[in-house]
Structures are given as structure tokens and as C-alpha cells.
Image: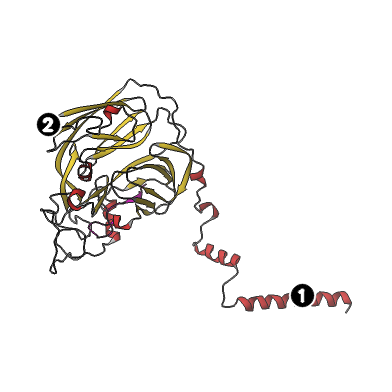
Amino acid sequence: MNKRTISLLLTMSLTLLAGCASSAENNGSEPPADSAQTVQAETGSVAKPEEILTTKKLRNLAPLSETDVIRPTNKVREFKLEAREGRWQLVSGVETNAYTFNGTVPGPTIRAKEGDTIRVIVKNSLPQETAIHWHGLHVPNRMDGVPSFTQNAIKPGETFTYEFTANHAGTYMYHSHFNSIEQIDKGLYGLLIIDPQNAGTLKHDREYAMIFGGWNIPDEPGGQPQTGQNDPMAGMSKGTSGPLKQKADIRSLMKHGMQDKPDSSTGNGGMQMPPSGTGSEAGSSVMGMDYNYWTINGKSFPDTDPLEVKYGETVRIRLTNVSNGIHPMHMHGHDFRIIAKDGHPLAAPQIVNTVTVNPGETYDIDFIADNPGEWVFHCHELHHTTNADVEPGGLMVLIKYVK
């Protein structure tokens, strides 16, 4: 046997010994990283590279455009609002007295295009004076709606006409500016949206708008909370006498929220709710801003309308906060961009999953519907996701993928 043959046999032997040692080391322990990935991929637990979610598509979306020169359109958009008392249902089983515009909370959405003339004829059918402020808009001083500064308050039975040019695209709101704590907290507000003359390159497949409200529903018609050792609701901030609070069935509530209309047979979707006689009065003037109900567009979860989306769509949400609470709005399953604040587009939109909407602020956000499922979008001040201290409730909506 020559030296070359002996050398070849030694090399083969060493290779075999190394392989055996490696197998012994891995026996009963975690496989190497690349091996683990292979095993998981075979079981379907690891997404293919092209399926892994990233923010690339979101980052590549164009920003909102802003109009530099606004030309009058010579179009008049006329709206009629009647401020009047009425009953309003915040969530199935909870109804209260409210101040409304045209019988609804919030009032009708006022929408126009830059350059249009907005004319709003307001009739006051309330038992007290009122006025309307156009929050965030640049209007003539006499149209700003602040009694004793820019106009006399509109007395009961009187009518006043506001008229101004829609001069800046964006998301805004309108609300009472007389006895405003009571009147706003009882529902006297609405959304105002101005569309741009030049739409720009950013397009959205769907659009939703939310206005956040805070409510105080007292325990009894007289506005005095129940107290005492025999009170089954002792320790709760509000709510008519009933069973001890308990956490609701989240699956039941999600199914309830996904329905186009509330199920009248189950009413509150399994949630422990105060009886329908609750709350003849509402508003922070009753209980010192001790809110116990929070609403999106006048409704508390699970009666909030779901945000329906289709896979691949780009969705815009307008957020407005007329309440006296701070609301960090958090979206599950997705990132979103902040594309405008207080009506002003951001040149460099910020990608986040939570945005804090302070009192009086508005934000425009958008996201790409790229992660199918049932997802919640809610306030992360978790007291604001309860109804009379019962969770989940309040400021929460379901993002619902549809075919």
C-alpha cells in the first residue's frame, strides 16, 4: 500500500468520525438554525419570503397633496341644522337625553370642496341659547360662532345663517360654543370635511371617519348615583342597579360588532348592561366630567360600525376628538401612516401603529389591508374601552375583511 492510498484512507476515516460526533451532539437537542427553518417550513408554520408582511408598500405610498391656489367654484353647498332635544341610544340597553342636530349624534356630516361656499342655516329648538363654531377652519370673524365675541347667541326659536368659503382641504368638526361643556357632552357636534380641488396622486379605495365623544350617564333619573352596602353596583363609577360587573365574552361581542344590524334577540351581545331606563340626564355638567361611556360616531362598542375592507385595499380613516379625553388609538394587525394633522398634510408621513388624539385634534391616517382576519382598532387608554366599567366597550371598532 503506497503513501497516497494511506493518506486517502485517513482522510475518509476522519470525515466519518466528524459526522458521527456531530450527530451525537445534536441528538435530543435543537437542530441547527437552517435545519429548524426547513422543518418548520415543511409544517407550514413559516411564511414564504414573498408572504412576509413589511411596510415597504406603505412607505412607497405618496403623501397627501396640498393646494397652493384655491379658486372659487361659484357653487353653494347649503345645509339645514336644527338643534333640538331628543333621546339617544349609546349602546343596546343604554339610552339618555341628548342635544342633537337633526335628531342624530353626531349631527349630519357637512362636506364640500375647496372653493365652494358653505351655507348652514341653524334653527335653535333647544330650551337654551346656542351657537356653532367651525373648529379649525379659517372663516370670517363674524362666522366663528363664539357668543359675546363674534355673534350674539342664537336664542330658542331663532334662526341664524352661517356662510363662508371652504378654503382649506382637511378633516374638521363643528360644535356648540355656548354652554359648551354641557352641550357638547350631550351630543351637539358633527364632522366637517373639505375635499381638495386637486386630488393629487394618492388614492384610497375606502374612507371612514370617526368622532370621539364622552358621556356621563348617571345611575338614576335624578342624576344621583346609588350608594350603600346593599348596592350591587358599589365600586362601579356609574350604571343603574344590576348584576355585578363581569368581563364580557369577546367572541360574542366581535360577532355582534360584525353584524350589519344589532341582533334584537340578544340586544347587548352578551354584555352586562344597565336597563333601558338608565340616564334621564347626561353630560359632564351633571357629574363633573366623570365620563363612564365613550362613543365613536355616537355609539359605544359593540354597537360601533365595523370598518369593512377588502384584501389589498388602501383605506383612509379620519379621526376627530371632540371629547375632553386623550385617546391613543391603536390598530391591531397593521401599521398605518399619519398623513395629516389638523387638516394639514404631512410631507413625510409617519408609520406607526398608535396615534394619540388629544382634545380638539384631528388626524388623517391610512393603511393597506394586507393581513386578513378580525382585528380591533381601539383606544389604549383602557378605561375608554369600557361601558360603565364593563369591558370591552367604548372606543373600539372591528376591522372586518370582506370578499
Q: Depth check: 55 or 196 in front?
A: 196
Image side of residue 4 versus residue 157, left or right: right
In this orientation, does residue 118 appear? no
Few, some or many C-alpha atoms within 10 Å of disc 2 (few <14, some 14-19, many ≥20)? Answer: few
SS class of the residue under badge 2? loop
What residue range appears in magenta? 385-403
Q: Would you say residue 350 is visible in this rendering?
A: yes
User: Where's residue 173, x and y in %?
Assistant: 30, 38
Spot occupied by residue 85 in the image (x, y as percentages of width and height): 14, 40
Which residue is at the far left? 222
Which of label 2 and label 1 is nearer to you?
2
Q: Which residue is mark 1?
A: 12
Residue depicted at 44% across the width and 32% down the height: 66
Residue at 41%, 38% (x, y): give it. Answer: 204
State the quadrant of the N terminus: bottom right
Type of amino acid under label 2:
Gly
Circle 2 residue:
157
| Total labels drawn | 2
Task: Say whether residue 312 is magenta.
Answer: no
Q: Main secondary structure of the magenta part?
A: loop
Whichever of labels 2 and 1 marks the residue nearer the N terminus, that label is 1
**Kind of residue indicated by mark 1:** Met
User: Could you say which quadrant of the image residue 160 lies in?
Assistant: top left
